[in-house]
Amino acid sequence: MANTRRTNADLTEIELDTETAPDDSSATKAIVVGPYPSRTRGDGPHRDQQARLAEAIGLAEAIELDIAEALIAPLSLVRPATYLGKGKVEEIAGIVKHHGAGLVSMDCQLSPVQQRNLEKAFGAKVIDRTGLILEIFGERARTKEGALQVELAHLAYQKSRLVRSWIHLERQRGGFGFLGGPGETQIETDRRLIAERMRRIETDLDKVKRTRGLHRKTRREVPYPVVALVGYTNAGKSTLFNRLTKAEVLAQDMLFATLDPTLRQVRLPHGARALLSDTVGFISDLPTMLVSAFRATLEEVTLADVILHIRDASHEDWDAQARDVETILAELGLAEDGERRIVEVWNKIDVLDEERLDALRMTARSGERGRPVLVSALSGEGEGELLARIETLIAAGRSTLHIELPAEDGQGLAWAYAHAEVLQRDTDEDGGARLLLRVAPERLEEVKRRFGV
């Protein structure tokens, strides 16, 4: 984005950088509209409007729309028929006509009536924030569970509206494909059929969840603690995941680049290992049906020994983003964990100027946010401190035991490695082993019984 300019009293327009616009001439040409309240409510200030619009543009770019123009429409009152006032609707209709746009993305939640009326007024398809996020999730889901969860959320969205005329994006390429294009049969919108399909999906999801539960049980049999990455979308979680695990998970400057959870091993400073879990990014106004649909996936977070809340320290709206993440963590029952299990990781310090970086370091030292760790997932700065912090938190919740094994007790040695973390191993001249074990609380009594400690 190049710069911001005010076109008139009602609309603020963002001029898009043509160098970053899609080259694909077949892409759907779109207008992005941010209908944001022009005054603050009593519950605190709004997000920065320019940051909100930039995020709305990012969502549209995530499905490769050709964005012809993006603008803010300050909103004093939500109109039941069209969400926006008559004058603004007419102005946007003129912009749509000028660019020959086929789609208008409204960064708000529209009712079915508002959506249809705006489509008539603009002479173009209209999609709201929920529909756009669902479309992105539909394209990004790679696992069977992810695809089922997204389809279930999408059907719940459809069921709540009169969807026979609900047509949106034309498919540009492969993907989940909720939104039909020319020549495709429109999704059957009869409520009874939708309900039947939702029941079938829920049955399939139950099977997948049982399988995931078995996998979790198998992982719990392995003595490695679990560390989960959470954070606002595009905060750099996948880049940090790759840095810590030497993996090659998709990491792009793109909203919702990661959807399906990924697990990899990470080695801690003193040689112990942990499992690192990369999860879907959070976002403001995440549709309720998606939070519900992905609750099973987010159980990876609730069961983690340590949770890393990754924050983009370079983002102008990073405090608002943190509040959104904390709200979802609270919904998952993690609000009271605090410093016991949640660590804030302030990422992207490599792009900060010295003044901003010094201010953040001073804030971090003050302990106001529970001693956050400053890192650059791109350069690796702060990686050692982060790993040490993870190890300290894991150790704080686990016990250490010294055991001695005779040389002939190979079975006991194998059992120790299978049921505890072996932090240190010394071998006697006669072949006996002295082990320093770190044991999870739920396993402590079992290990003590096994070795008579």
Image (cartoon, rainbow, N blue to C red):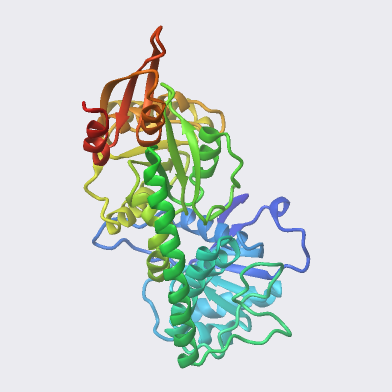
Q: Which residue is drawn at 35% across and 38% down?
A: 344
Q: Is residue 317 visible?
A: no
Q: Which residue is drawn at 51% across and 41% down?
A: 264
- Above/below status of 354 relative to 131: above
Total labels drawn: 0
Residue 339 percent coordinates (x, y): 26, 37
Quarter holding the C terminus is top left
- Residue 122 image-quadrant placement: bottom right
- Above/below status of 148 relative to 300: below
Residue 225 percent coordinates (x, y): 37, 38
Q: Is residue 424 visible?
A: yes
- Residue 31 image-quadrant placement: bottom right
Residue furthest to the top: 429
- Above/below status of 126 relative to 51: below
Q: Residue at x 63, y 73 (%)?
A: 177
412 relative position to 100: left or right:
left
Which one is nearer the viewer's eye here, 327 or 7? 327
- Above/below status of 431 relative to 37: above
Residue 53 percent coordinates (x, y): 51, 59
Residue 210 percent coordinates (x, y): 41, 63
